[in-house]
Amino acid sequence: MNNMVDTAPSAENKAPNRSSRNVKKATYPTYFESFDYTQMLRDYPLGEAVFEQFEGLSKNALKALQNERFMHVVKRAWEIPFYQRIWGNAGVKPTDIQSLDDIEKLPLISKSDIMDSVEQYPPIGDFHGLDDIPPEQRPPLVFHTTSGTTGTPQPLLFGPKSREIQSLLVARSYRFMGLKPAATIQSCYGHGMINGGHYIREAVTKYTNSMFLSAGTGVETRSVQQVNLMKTFGVNVLVGFVDYIKRLADVAKEEGLVPGKDIKIDMIIGHLGMESRESIAKTWGNPELFDWYGVGDTGTIAAEGPDHSGMYVWEDAQYLELLDTDTNNPVAPGETGNMVVTCLYKDDVYPIIRFNTHDITQEVVGDNSLNLPFKRIKGFMGRSDNMVKLRGINIYPQGVGPMLDERSEFLGEFICEAVRDESGRDEMIVTAEVSTPLGERDALLPAYADLLKRKIGIEVKVALVGEGELTPLTQVDIRQKPIRLIDSRFK
């Protein structure tokens, strides 16, 4: 014992260690320390709590809640150079905005403004509000980009609070629709840098008790493997873009699997827009279908309820305006307009105030059977910036497919091409996939031309092709949102 060496540090050696412990080190909050998670759950209810809080609530009470949250978000926005610049250039002063009633004094913003910010202040712009926060005080971030299919990808930044509310609103939507306890959900949303698949996964795993299969697109998990996953794990809910969901039903049949028997899907949650629900349901053995709407920047805005009477706007979290595509003035209830959204909860990173999605819809007028105070919208009807104007008629390519659904041989895939002839006259060619043999297709052309003339209001040209021939153009097998318009007029 006496020969053992004393390895304990001397007082002299201890001093530097004590001193180093006393030095204040730079630190920063962890994800859930950066906001009040319990308060968030109280403020944004889930499940039956949605009805407990909002059923029978008056429009005035809802407006008061919106006003309180709006003013808080506006206060945050005034601290950010992006809004200081845009609002200042429009002649708006902080004192001009006293309530939600003053929102129309604020200019609209859109993706182009965000990209201008990125160009001026690379690489992530000055719209997020992080620049004046010392690094040791910055909250953790979730970073994604848009797909970049129409140009340079747009950065998307989320603070912990707003990210969790976005995820919660997805789960609120699913549970509102009637998602069963312990369901098995397969997601066909893409991952990688884009936001879609990631925040759907976060929503399901954090705010439901479903088992989640993050299959992704056909590029991430081959379509054949996807349908086998469904069978193996007993998937009963499919979520994603319906173009690909329809394609998976065909793949299942090619594999010798019968949708509705070998794969028993009882719920499809997609972005239905004006798509034929009957044709989608039929391919999967007649599950119940639900629509919802949101964009990458804002998250979920509206969701279809169990009454299947339009999509309810989550107005405790989102303030939605429907504005005329030309004048930006409010449209009358029931008229078509651009969806312009203000996120009432994004007061941490990247406030979103009067963001013009350029997506078109209509308000569903009248009372709802659920006794909720929220306005309802019809669904995605097309994009105002992807519109073709022919002889005074506005044509939204996204809406052409549903027009063709009354033809039994139409297979659901189509593409529109805008062309300009030598005289300067604009025309549109609609090409559709049909099951009809090649030699019999020409006989169908007059019927298709008459159908589109009746529904669009002007004559368009028609071409018919076989199954799968449009895939190289629409890229339905690799894109979440297939290409529906080729504009060749200015090439």
Image (cartoon, rainbow, N blue to C red):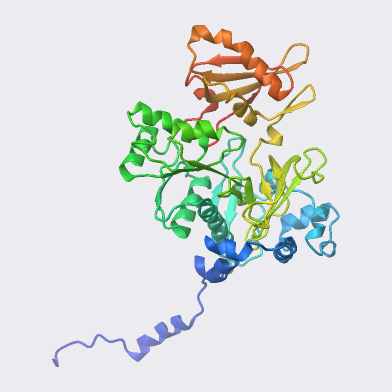
Residue 262 in the image: state x and y as whole percent: 33, 36
Q: Is residue 24 above or below residue 302?
A: below
Picture residue at 36% right of the left edge, 41% below the top: 230
User: Which residue is nearer to you in this view: 75 or 285?
Assistant: 285
Nearest the eye: 151 or 57? 57
Q: Residue at x 53, y 21 (%)?
A: 408
Considering only vertical position in the picture, is 312 above or below 55?
above
Q: Residue at x 68, y 32 (%)?
A: 386
Q: Quadrant of the C terminus?
A: top right
- Give the residue furthest to the top: 439
Q: Quadrant of residue 430?
A: top right
How many numbered callouts? 0
Q: Is residue 479 visible?
A: no
Splitting the image into 4 quarters, where does residue 227 fall? top left
Left/right placement of residue 270 relative to residue 67 reads left
Closer-to-camera residue (191/245): 245
Question: From the image, which quarter does the N terminus lie in?
Answer: bottom left
Q: Position of residue 453 (x, y in %)?
A: 70, 19
Residue, far front:
369
In this picture, residue 476 sits left or right of residue 86: left
Q: Position of residue 182 (x, y in %)?
A: 39, 55
Most extreme residue toward the bottom, as rendered? 2
Residue 62, visible in the rendered structure: yes
Residue 159 to residue 272: above or below: below
Q: Position of residue 203 (x, y in %)?
A: 49, 55
